Amino acid sequence: DAKTTQPPSMDCAEGRAANLPCNHSTISGNEYVYWYRQIHSQGPQYIIHGLKNNETNEMASLIITEDRKSSTLILPHATLRDTAVYYCIVRVYFGNEKLTFGTGTRLTIIP
Amino acid sequence: NAGVTQTPKFRILKIGQSMTLQCTQDMNHNYMYWYRQDPGMGLKLIYYSVGAGITDKGEVPNGYNVSRSTTEDFPLRLELAAPSQTSVYFCASSYPPSGGASNEQFFGPGTRLTVL
């Protein structure tokens, strides 16, 4: 599976959009981009995933560049409850079901 | 639905002791997983199972054993506890892949284990 690079930490003002970048320059054609988050010491929570098209759900939007070498997770109106560690993961479908977590980005929402 | 439940929440073991971490899910998921998370690090996969009677190793299986006799339960066994196994253990479950992508994994609240 391709490796990912994320900034270790970011701050965002409450009510503003939080944009979390992820580089995955070695991603291959059959690998998906997944985002999970971990609030405090709880179990990780799925946010969104995509292959090459931009995706949106009730939690967030995922923007994947045309060359698929990077992506951005967007939380449109960040709240204090969005303070968490965010993990960007790439994984191949035709393989085992491993999720390989890096160290993620610690997002802090500032009141 | 209770989702994924784990017991115990906390445990302190002495070196060489054994214990079983319990994991149960009520979502009828075929796939189940065990991860460990060391302080300041991401999660690492220990073992996973794609159905009752089928298990496979993940990234860090040494020192652990699993079994899967039912769809609902996926216990993790530590036979001879070592300080290096001090960690937070998360169990997760999911449906099989569909539409070319993996289904989301649902995580339990974790078991915090300390080995002294």
Image (spheres, coloured by chain):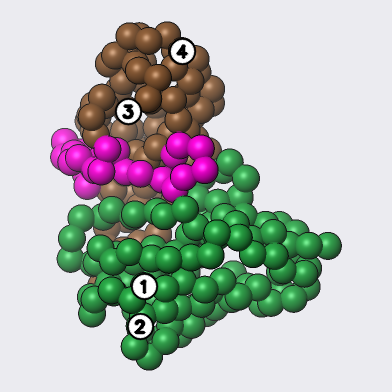
Chain colours: A green, B brown
Q: Which residue is the site of mark 4?
A: B116
Question: A64 and B96: which one is in front?
Answer: A64
Determine the residue positioned at 41% across, 79% down.
A70
The amino acid on which the numbered mark 3 sits, given as a three-letter code, is: Pro
Q: Are marks 1 and 2 in contact (CB under 8 Å)?
A: yes
Q: Secondary structure at mark 4?
A: loop
**Magenta stretch in the rendered image:** B37-60
Q: Is residue B19 visible to the viewer in this orientation of the structure?
A: yes
State which quarter of the image contains the N terminus of chain A.
bottom left
Determine the residue positioned at 25% across, 24% down.
B63
Q: Which residue is the site of mark 3?
A: B75
Rendering coords of residue B53 (x, y %): 16, 36
Q: Which residue is the site of mark 2?
A: A68
Determine the residue positioned at 45% across, 37% down.
B38
Q: Secondary structure at mark 2?
A: loop
Rendering coords of residue A90 (x, y %): 34, 66
Q: Chain of mark 3?
A: B
The amino acid on which the numbered mark 2 sits, given as a three-letter code, is: Arg
Q: CA distance from mark 3 to mark 4?
A: 22 Å
- Per the rendering, the mark at residue A91 is none
Instruction: Verify whether residue B58 appears in magenta.
Output: yes
* Both labels 3 and 1 in a single chain: no
Q: Which residue is the site of mark 1?
A: A24
